[in-house]
Amino acid sequence: MRELLTWLARGAFRPQPIARLAVLRILASLAILGFMASRIHHADDWLSVAGFRVPEGTDWRQPLSLPALPEWAAWSVAAALAVAGLATAAGAFTRWASAVFAALLAYVALADRLSAFTVSKLAPVIALALCLSPSGARYSVDAWRQARRDPSAPRPELVSGGCVLFFQVLLPVFYFASGLAKARGDWRTHPYVLWTHLHDSYQTTVSWFIANHAPTWMWTVTQRAVLVFECGAPLWFALPWTRPFALAFGVGMHLMIGLMFGPVIWFSLLMMTLLVASYAPERWLTRALQLGRRLPPR
């Protein structure tokens, strides 16, 4: 048994390409900032005494209630959030920037619970994981500064496997929890739950067109396929021969979610980033990161 656990640990924590962390740092930070942009634009209504506040409760089962800020402090928090997010994406002073980014994301998620959605709750965890990993060691301002100080210093190609494994485990667990909730609801018993979602306030031109022109049975098939994908996600992503298909299905699913449910576009972009950075072939990620170096000067 000990030998088996040792073998599993070695396989799980083997070094991983640092390109995965770099893609996560850049694109995940930008997707999170894109989601927060509409809130940052109205920081006074969002965080200050000028906006509506949920009455503070004393029930221990409720999330922590944080008092509203003065308007100048609300705008300061919003500006710091934007600067920290951009610095994290650029890899400038990455440890400090991502730590501040994570702390501010956690604060705003608790400060305005009514506008805290999935991205709000995932974002602090992602930023903290980037802070605790060497995500700024390559393809970043920090790496450029290090190269200027010491041109002969080696450039890391690999990182400890746990830095990437966290994200590779986060996704299947997230999907499994989502699938379990759907299975316990109406997704397993009602064949048209997905179709009814298309007529909500998030409807786009794409969802309106597809809802009116696609055959009815297609929605039931798609609904069942999503349920099988999410409930079986730990297996699909664990097995090497099913992993490419799981990656393709996941990216396609989130692409359609982004196209058919307008305000959810930032969630879709964040999830596609996590999927591609965690499971796409390394050479794809490295070529994408190096693309800028190969472009002709303008």
Image (cartoon, helix red, strand yellow):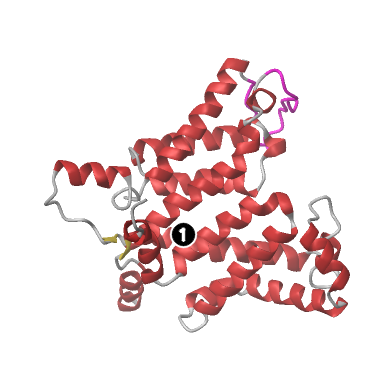
Q: Position of residue 296 (x, y in %)?
A: 34, 58
Question: Percent position (x, y) of residue 282?
Answer: 37, 69
Q: Residue furthest bottom?
A: 241
Task: Please tell me whether residue 124 is drawn above or below residue 156 in the rendered image.
Answer: above
Q: Nearer the viewer, residue 230 or 25?
A: 25
- Foreground residue among 48 and 162: 48
Residue reaching furthest to the front:
298
Q: Is residue 52 visible?
A: yes
In this rendering, the count of numbered labels is 1
Q: Is residue 130 left or right of residue 170?
A: left
Instruction: Give the residue drawn at x 86%, y 72%.
Output: 213
In the foreground, 1 or 49: 49
Dividing the picture into quarters, in which one does residue 44 lie? top right
Residue in the image at 46% along x and 33% along y: 83
* Most common SS among magenta residues: loop
Q: Residues within 10 Å of mark 1 (few under 14, many from 20)?
A: many
Magenta region includes residue 251 = no
Compared to 82, does 155 lie above or below?
Answer: below
Residue 58 position in % (x across, y down): 71, 28
Amino acid, disc 1: Phe
Bounds of the magenta span?
49-68
| Secondary structure of residue under mark 1 | helix
**Residue 67 lies in the magenta stretch:** yes
Q: Judge from the rendering whether residue 47 lies leftward or rightward of residue 273; answer left or right.
A: right
Give the side of residue 36 with respect to residue 159, left or right.
right
Q: Residue at x 40, y 69 (%)?
A: 284
Residue 190 visible in the shown view: no
Residue 172 placement: quadrant: bottom right
For the N terminus, the image quarter is bottom left
At which x and y percent is residue 271?
57, 58
Residue for badge 1: 167
